[in-house]
Image: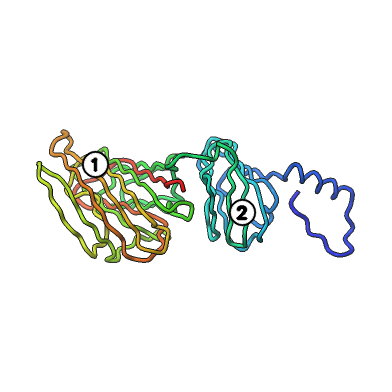
Amino acid sequence: MAIQTFVASTVLTAAQMNALQANDYNQTVSTKTASYTLVAADKGTKIVMNSASATTITVNTSLFSAGDTLTILNISTGVCTVTAGTATVSTTGNLALAQNGGGTLYFTSAGVSVFQANGVASAAGGLIAIVPSSVTVSGGSATTSTNGQVAITSVPLSGTVLLNGVFSASYTNYRIIINRTADSTSSQFSARLSVGGTASTASDYFVNYLYVAANVVYGETATAGTSFALEISSRKLAYISLDIMNPFVATHTGIIINSTGATAAGLTGLLANNFGINKATTSYDGFQLVNSSDGASSGTISVYGYNK
């Protein structure tokens, strides 16, 4: 039974009293099988997520008051992520709840909450897989697995893959892993940051490149670009990791890019280390991959948050 409101001269029945007393020991349970956004009536109750697919529980502001609490528990195999909507959600534990993970959401004000994770089940390691809220593909196709990995197929020249809702207040820093495992000729990837499903093409991308090819070390600088180049030269196969710092914070976004690639025969390899910033003081929530040269590409994209 949710918390009740009583006014002067209200008659408290025996049934109501028994229900309130029972709730002291056994919270009212609301079971969800799909992603859910909290409402004011959830105060004092237990939200139980029961889904084999990845889900989110979104927390918005102006629904709860300082001192309000509710409990969240994930009982199924799909990871349930407690997500900051318009409210702030902080924790010393983990907001991505594996099966049997849970905790208490405590509000310090109408727009600020702390998730107090219970036990070992919520204490995950350093990298937490993030499931995009949606994936938008321009050319080719994409599918998303329950652990958040996006498989792309036949993304053509100038085709894009936009991962929406991967950056939030839950994490400060992120790692993105890209494996291009098939290509019709040879391709080169670049990346942009995005807000609300729209990629930023402003001239805010600055990168220094250091790369090795044919036993020679090269250095380049790109200023005021409209994207981050993830590779220096086109390759059929490529393996790229990006560390992105502060994308959701309204300040400069830092990026470190490591990439290696080869021809289909495994020859003519190239190794690159790129470092740069997006100078805009923008809160970004997404990431766009652009196939910027030659033929169609296929592979996988995975996003992880560094656990605080």
Disc 1 crowd, CA 10 A, few/some/many (<14, 14-19, 20+): many
Q: Secondary structure at mark 2?
A: loop
Q: Is residue 181 above or below residue 196?
A: above
Q: Residue at x 26, y 44 (%)?
A: 297
> Residue 227: percent from the left, percent from the top?
27, 58
Q: Residue at x 80, y 43 (%)?
A: 22
In the shown orientation, is residue 3 left or right of residue 281? right
Q: Residue at x 31, y 64 (%)?
A: 279
What amino acid type is highlighted by mark number 2?
Answer: Leu
Q: Quadrant of residue 23?
A: top right
What amino acid type is highlighted by mark number 1?
Answer: Ala
Which label is found at residue 100?
A: none
In the shown orientation, is residue 264 left or right of residue 149? left
Q: Quadrant of residue 286?
A: bottom left
> Residue 33: percent from the left, percent from the top?
59, 42
User: Sequence-wise, which precedes: disc 2 or disc 1?
Assistant: 2
> Residue 58: percent from the left, percent from the top?
55, 53
- Asked if disc 2 and disc 1 are in contact, CB closer than 8 Å, the reply is no
Disc 2 crowd, CA 10 A, few/some/many (<14, 14-19, 20+): some
Which residue is nearer to you in this view: 6 or 113?
113
Q: Secondary structure at mark 1?
A: strand
Q: Quadrant of residue 112?
A: bottom right
> Residue 239: percent from the left, percent from the top?
26, 41
Which label is found at residue 238?
A: 1
Q: Is residue 218 above or below residue 53?
A: below
Which label is found at residue 38?
A: 2
* Rendering colour mode: rainbow
- Spot the residue most to the top: 265
Q: CA distance from mark 2 to mark 1?
A: 41 Å
Q: Is residue 212 above or below residue 114?
A: above
Instruction: Report how many numbered discs are placed on residues in the image.
Output: 2
